[in-house]
Image (tube, helix red, strand yellow):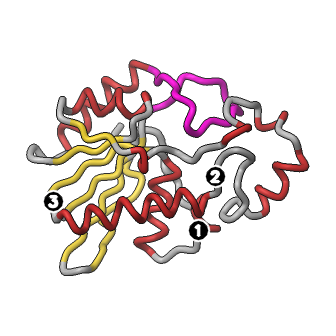
Amino acid sequence: MDIYLIRHTEVNIAKGICYGQSDLDVLQDSVQQTSEQLSLLLPQNKTLYSSPLKRCKTLASHLTNQVLFDDRLMEMNFGDWELQDWNNINQAELNPWMEDFVNIQVPNGESFVQLHGRTVDFINELINNQEKQIVIITHAGVIRSWLCEVLGIPLKNAFKLAIDYGSVSKLSFNYNHWSVQFINNKLS
């Protein structure tokens, strides 16, 4: 089984704003260019899964009209911090989270370990389905979580993995063994 993990294209929001499950639009010119490049890389016969958030749905709809949406592929829920400037978030809440984002839950949101739990649940379901060619349009947090699981990297090191907008990471699962073909491949 080959799995192509694709991060959505660039979002239309000011720099420095916290967003996770907020349903944001993307910069439209980046979607067209990325989808054209992806069509050259991706297999013809594929099953395409996507986060239901607009920034993923938009790219997915450019690749096929048969998309399976799954909430487990959504970005981390930043709860009360959604759409807040990172500099304006209450430091008494932010600082402990910055020290241990893996385990500390964002107020009215989730922790990274919670995101990781739903990612692993999705991975296990895919393994059991035994599909051959899978494309997943999702978010940087989900991709980092998945790569940590496959590579045995502690979750606290997830942000050492660069996952750019519109990038592709390819994994293979054969004979109960994961292998990483490439990470953060930029098409342009």
Nearer-N-terminus badge (3/2): 2
- Quick check: 40 left or right of 95? left
Q: Are marks 3 and 1 in contact (CB under 8 Å)?
A: no
* Picture quarter with the C terminus: top left
Q: Which residues are magenta?
A: 9-27
Q: Quadrant of residue 32?
A: top left
Q: Tell me, for residue 95, which label it has, or none.
A: none
Toward the viewer: 29 or 50?
A: 50
Q: Quadrant of residue 130?
A: bottom left
Compared with 112, 86 (above or below) is above
User: Which amino acid type is shown beneath numbered disc 1?
Assistant: Leu
Q: Mark 1 and mark 2: span between their CA atoms?
A: 15 Å
Q: Are marks 1 and 2 in contact (CB under 8 Å)?
A: no
Residue lying at the far front in this picture: please name it: 108
Numbered-mark total: 3
Neighbours of disc 2 within 10 Å: few (<14), some (14-19), many (20+): some
Mark 1 or 2, which is nearer the eye? 2
User: Which amino acid type is shown beneath numbered disc 2?
Assistant: Glu
Q: Mark 3 and mark 2: span between their CA atoms?
A: 30 Å
- Residue that carries the numbered disc 2 in the rendered image: 110
- Residue that carries the numbered disc 3 in the rendered image: 131
- Residue that carries the numbered disc 1 in the rendered image: 155
Q: Residue at x 67, y 34 (%)?
A: 82
Toward the viewer: 119 or 140?
A: 119
Give percent across and percent down for residue 11.
Answer: 52, 28
Give percent across and percent down for residue 124.
Answer: 32, 67
Q: Quadrant of residue 180?
A: bottom left
Q: What secondary structure is found at the residue carrying circle 2?
A: loop
Q: Residue at x 76, y 31 (%)?
A: 85
User: Which amino acid type is shown beneath numbered disc 3?
Assistant: Glu
